[in-house]
Image (cartoon, rainbow, N blue to C red):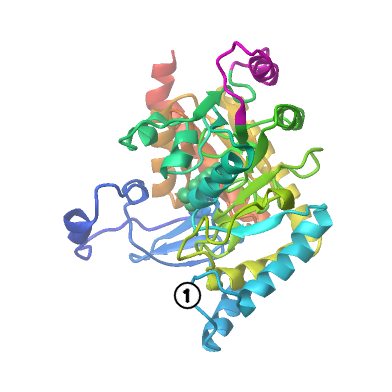
Amino acid sequence: MMITTPQPSGNLPDRSIYERRESAVRSYARSMPRQFGKAQGVWMHDDQGGRYLDFLSGCSTLNYGHNHPILKQALLDYIAADGIAHGLDLHTDAKQDFLDTFEEVILKPRGLDHRVMFTGPTGTNAVEAAIKLARKVTGREMVIAFTNGFHGMTLGALACTGNATKRGGAGVPLSHVAHEPYYDYYGPEVDTAELLEQRLADPSSGLDAPAAILVETVQGEGGLNAASAEWLRRIAGIAKAHGALLIVDDIQAGCGRTGTFFSFEDMGFTPDIVTLAKSLSGMGLPFALTLLRPELDQWSPGEHNGTFRGNNHAFVTATAALRHFWSADDFQRDIGRRAALLETRLARIAAEHGFEVRGRGMMRGVNVGSGELAATVTAACFDAGLIIETSGAHDEVIKVLAPLVIDDAVLGAGLDILESKIREAMATDYAVAAE
Ligand SMILES: *Cc1c(COP(=O)(O)O)cnc(C)c1O
């Protein structure tokens, strides 16, 4: 299968409004300078007749693709019936339906007795709630986060984020967080779980007793570093031994991205707190939540508040997605098959150029060793009709976040583009630079 997309030509409509009025903080629009109108399944369309295969999926907010017909119909029906639209944390038909379904389809079969806390609708809200609760319950201030971790842009979550550029925007000291080396930060020889254990056990290490250990099982923005189940189990054990709560930030890795609904399933530990957002609504609608063990539910009513703590439209699409994709095993089997295909293809690309494959499940990429090379490749992919982004400390990891519902053949066609654009880039500028 071939993917082609016409390049914009001739007289484009006037787009000067963006330069004139939209804040300079805009970012994705800079690497994808088109105007998008429609999207369906794995395809996005610009207003000049261009068609793009989406290997970004709204940064993993669209695991089920764009405008999935079942989710879309559920939302259209709900709006047509004058369903409640505002977001206060009232009890609504849509909320009950979501909670009943989430309990039946996700929590019960996985033996999780966690309570569901509706936070503000973006991921950073769920992280703020998680660390605030951990501090409140333990009476401790310090949170342990990890190198290359990404947890959001509000001050508490930003303090847990590693990236210096993002941190630099804070304007105040980011405090009460210790950044410890993640899984393989020092390479395979250094046991970072052992280092953490040593520092926490040593009363003179200078590391205060933590309220929580906050971890991603696969670091989405930080370069697709995937921790082993064994390392994560040990981190869970260390948290327990030292009276800290284990928070798994599953905002990007959850909702099926790594192959199971939660990224930590079948790993032999249960987080005290879990954050979910991104693909939770299934349709790109803002929706986040924080799961907490029942004994941690020590909030007083409204203590952590927010006007938009119940996006009813998102409840409707999330419920439809849970029912359609997660009530049986076939979707997980499909993800497994596609993930294997993705891994095989990326391994071939990596072997050809001496690169390294990163990640787990359908959250995988290839570390090309240079942000400049990665940017050249992703720009060439975009011109060829493939939307794909980078990740990592130097944006050196080309990251495949294809919709989980993608057809195997279409996935292959997208990877053909990636393979050829890497080959082309290597054959020109970078072959020389590498010598
Ligand atoms: C995207 C992301 C966040 C922040 O979510 P926002 O909706 O952008 O606030 C937090 N943690 C992880 C792991 C993420 O990928």
Q: Quadrant of residue 42?
A: bottom right
Quarter of the picture containing the N terminus is: bottom right
Please state the horizontal and vertical placement of residue 270, each as a whole percent of the image.
76, 42
Q: Is residue 287 magenta?
A: no
- Residue 230 left/right relative to 193: right
Q: Nearer the viewer, residue 322 or 172?
A: 172
Q: Which residue is mark 1?
A: 86
The quarter of the picture where the C terminus appears is top left
181 vs 420: above or below? above
Q: Identify which residue, 366 or 267, lies in the foreground.
A: 267
Q: Amino acid at mark 1?
A: His
- Is residue 207 a member of the stretch shown in magenta? yes
Secondary structure state at the residue bearing disc 1: loop
Count of numbered circles in the view: 1
Residue 68, can we see it?
A: no
Residue at figure coordinates x 78%, y 38% from the top left: 269
Along the horizontal axis of the image, is 432 left or right of 362? Answer: left
Q: Nearer the viewer, residue 427 or 155?
A: 155
Using the image, determine if residue 390 lies above or below residue 61.
above
x and y, in percent, of residue 236 in the image: 73, 32
Q: Which residues are magenta?
A: 186-210
Residue 247 visible in the snapshot: yes
